[in-house]
Each structure stands twice: as C-alpha cells, then as structure tokens.
C-alpha cells in the first residue's frame, strides 16, 4: 500500500547549522512531494514542494531534492534559526483522480540558540 | 484573500453525541480534503470532495463518519455517536481546480470527547 517513511523523528541542531530530513515513498506513481511545517497547536504550512519532473528546488534557506529511482526525497534547511523549530512533515501524492496526501510521521526539529 | 476557514476551533462532546465540523475553502478553490491528526501523530487522509461529489473516501472509517460539500455553503464532516478515540485535531485543506496539487490547510478543529 501507499506509505511514506520519514527520518529522523527528532533532530537537534545548533543555530546556524544545517538540518536534513529524509523521506522515502513506496508508490512509484507518486509525482508530487510537498513539505509542511507545523508549529505547536497550529495548522500545517506548506513551505516548499517539488514535482517528479524536477530533481531539486530551492527557496532561500530551504531546498528539496528528489531521487525518483530510489523513491527518496529530502528537505535541507541551511543557516538554521530558532524560529525554524517545529515539526516538519513530508508527503507524497499521485495527483490525478485523487490528490490525497500521504504524510510521513514527522520530524521534530529543535534549533538551539 | 481569506485562507481556509474552519469552525468551531474547539469542540467538546460527550460520548454518544454528534460532532459537526465545518470547512470553507479558500476563495477560488473547489477541492476540499479532510485529514485527522491524533495526538503526537502525523496527518491521515480521510476524504476528498468536490462540490456535490465525494471523489475519494478511502480514509474514512466505515461507520459513524460522513462528509459532504454542498453546492452552497461549507463542507461538513459529521461524526455520529462519538467515542473517546475520535478525540483528535481535524484539518481541512483546499486546492484550486484544474489538477493543481498544492493543498492549503485551515486552522483545524480540536475535538475532545469526554
């Protein structure tokens, strides 16, 4: 069945360091991969996404890479700041008749000042 | 441009009562999705609706749960005869028509069953 695995479950970094979160997906038909940031008690916020026809996408300090062959995608945050502390979720979707997102289990990122 | 709206933000129900959760999509969006987030867990897909149509309900429990998105008005997720295990945050998301994938989430409804 459809499954997205996410690692690590927790990640602690020093302010200014980089953070990397990795996800793998099971359904080779998946073609859309968003990343959401969720602060405590708040809604998930879309921070970046990538489609299967692209290998890498960058937006300021955030970048996402996709390896379709390995069914693997990653979130990279550079120059981390305390306000980056949150839970990050990866997700995968096949689009088409259903756009449902299959989410990973989340990574709690703590940026230590 | 208002974002996705959900109400109520918090809902307390006793076991056996009914819960009705409402979602108004972003302006111009005609696709609505409901997800459930149990405490300390990720988001699980429940149902995908377009106006007057259920497109995918593969994540909905077989009993007590139903959803609709009428021609006029918000989408509604209805939970009948709630049990303690229904306590969770229920998030609605919307996306534009035309196969665009981005989903934007509402603030959620936190349901507590006592």
Image (cartoon, grey):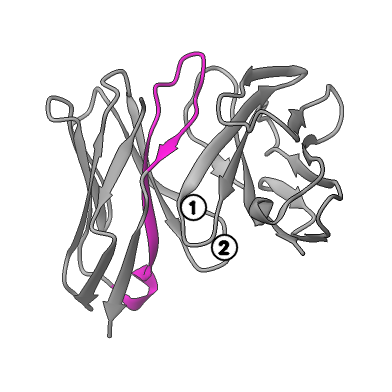
Location of residue B93 (image quadrant): top right
Q: Are marks 2 and 1 in contact (CB under 8 Å)?
A: yes
Q: Residue at x 34, y 34 (%)?
A: A3
- Structural crowding at the residue carrying mark 2, measured as other residues with C-alpha within 10 Å and reported as few (<14), some (14–19) or many (≥20): few
Left or right side of A45 for A26: left
Residue A100 is a magenta residue? yes
Q: Position of residue B33 (x, y in %)?
A: 61, 33
In percent of width and height, residue B105 lies at 58, 46
- Which residue appears at 56% of the width and 24% of the height? B58
Q: Please say if A56 is above or below A86.
A: above
Total numbered labels placed on residues in the image: 2
Q: Work out whether residue A74 or residue A47 is closer to the camera in this orientation and state it.
A: A74
Residue nearest the observer in this picture, B35 or A96: B35
Which residue corresponds to the image point at 67% horizontal and 50% vertical from the top-left? B86
Q: Quadrant of residue B75?
A: top right
What residue lies at 73% left-to-right and 49% top-to-bottom? B6
The residue identified by callout 2 is: A42
Q: Which residues are magenta?
A: A81-103
Callout 2: SS: loop
- As helix, strand or loop, the secondary structure at mark 1 comes to strand
Q: Do discs 2 and 1 share a chain?
A: yes
User: Which of the pair B83/A87 is nearer the observer?
Assistant: B83
Is B102 covered by the magenta stretch?
Answer: no
Mark 1 chain: A
For residue A30, above or below residue A50: above
Q: Is residue A110 visible?
A: yes
| Residue at the extreme top | A97
Q: Residue A99 — which label? A: none
User: Which percent across, then down, holds residue B61?
Assistant: 63, 33
- The quadrant of the image that shows the C terminus of chain B is bottom right
Residue marked by disc 1? A45
For marks 2 and 1, give the CA distance: 9 Å
């Amino acid at each position: 069945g459809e499954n997205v695995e996410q690692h690590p479950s927790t990640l602690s970094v020093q302010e200014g360091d980089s953070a990397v979160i990795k996800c793998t997906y099971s359904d080779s038909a998946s073609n859309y991969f968003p990343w959401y940031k969720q602060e405590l008690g708040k809604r998930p916020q879309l921070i970046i996404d990538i489609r299967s026809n692209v290998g890498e996408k960058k937006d300021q300090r955030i970048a996402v890479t996709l390896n379709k062959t390995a069914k693997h995608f990653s979130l990279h945050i550079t120059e981390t700041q305390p306000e980056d502390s949150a839970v990050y979720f990866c997700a995968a979707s096949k689009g088409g008749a259903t756009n449902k997102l299959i989410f990973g289990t989340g990574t709690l990122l703590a940026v230590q000042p | 441009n208002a974002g996705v709206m959900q109400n109520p933000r918090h809902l307390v129900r006793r076991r056996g009562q009914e819960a009705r959760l409402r979602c108004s999509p972003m302006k111009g969006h005609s696709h609505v999705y409901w997800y459930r987030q149990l405490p300390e867990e990720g988001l699980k897909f429940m149902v995908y609706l377009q106006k007057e149509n259920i497109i995918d309900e593969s994540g909905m429990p077989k009993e007590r749960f139903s959803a609709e998105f009428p021609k006029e008005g918000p989408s509604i997720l209805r939970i009948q005869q709630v049990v303690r295990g229904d306590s969770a945050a229920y998030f609605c998301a919307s996306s534009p028509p035309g196969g665009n994938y981005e989903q934007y989430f509402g603030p959620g409804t936190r349901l507590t069953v006592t």
